[in-house]
Amino acid sequence: MNYRHAFHAGNFADLLKHASLIAVLSRFMAKPGPITAVDTHAGAGLYDLAGPEAERSREARSGAMRLTRGDLPPVMAALRRAVEARNPAGSGPLRVYPGSPVLIAELLRPQDRLIACELRPDVHAQLEAAFAPFRPRAQALATDGYLELSAIARRRPERLFALIDPPFERADDYVRLAEAAAATLDAVPDACLLIWTPLKDLETFDACVRRLEPIAPERTLIAEARLRPLTDPMRLNGCALIAVNAPPAAEPDIEAACAFVVEALGDAGGRAKLWRP
């Protein structure tokens, strides 16, 4: 399965990830001090939901398009406002969906900075264009996001926030994300990390959690959105968001986002679950 952002922009996983991202980062910014934010696998920043990649999967139709509902919980309404800001009123169906680097850049203050990493040259060029309104606080780097995050953490910024959201096209992504998380928290113990993973089968997910579990178990929260039972490992059956050092005030928002995704978009037998390792 291809997890590149453009093919899945605005799908159910984006709803959980991006609604939780807005909630966690907004709460993280409540404390003083400049923030260094890192998006390790940033993607293009903005996505055309009528473009060839999105049209090929059509996943936004059962994702972002559902944000037009009137009875959204507050955490999902905040994401809807961010999406509507990119789609002028009266312009018809949603056409533009903001990815994580743009959502982060829009939240940050002048004293904060964002380093967004994207290795694919064509996608990096799109990210550079999307960042035009946010310079100089937002910077797009054509570099390995795992290595960049670890290097930034070694410089021990005052406050560090990171989203680790790889495409899982490489066999070692699960290992490298755990290594990057461990290196980051070793250098900056109070860094706030959000880690996204697909849910296809229980064995792969359990192995991912086992790698992360020794790092900071007492400060880790895991949100699972299972759209259906994990019986077919060839399908994307759900996703999980692993949060380390997330502000406690954001936990109800993560729970509400997880519940919304499962209840609004899941099949019979789906479930939402928050737990600590």
Image (tube, grey):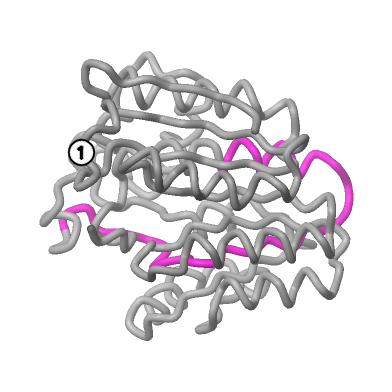
Horizontal side of 48 relative to 113 (left or right) equals left
197 vs 144, left or right, is: left
Q: Position of residue 250 (x, y in %)?
A: 67, 29
Please rate how many residues cluster around mark 1, counting C-alpha atoms within 10 Å: few if below 14, some from 14 to 19, many from 20: few
In the image, residue 246 above or below residue 264: below
Which structural element holds mark 1? Answer: loop
Task: Give the residue type at disc 1.
Answer: Asp
Residue 201 image offset from top left, x and y in percent? 33, 41
| Above-or-below relation of 239 to 1 | above
Q: Can residue 36 be found in the magenta stretch?
A: yes
Identified at 55% across, 24% down, the residue is 274
In the image, the segment drawn in magenta is 21-50
41 is within the stretch colored magenta: yes
Q: Which residue is mark 1?
A: 232
The structure residue drawn at horizontal position 47% and vertical position 75%, both measured from the top left corner, is: 118
Q: In this view of the protein, which residue sits in the foreground, 168 or 127?
A: 168
In x, y percent, where is residue 275?
59, 25
Which quadrant holds the C terminus?
top right
157 lies left or right of 81:
right
Left/right of residue 12 with respect to residue 213 in the rendered view: left
Nearest to the observer: residue 152 or residue 31? 152
Compared to residue 84, the image places residue 274 above or below, namely: above
> Total of numbered circles in the picture?
1
Is 205 rendered above or below residue 96? above
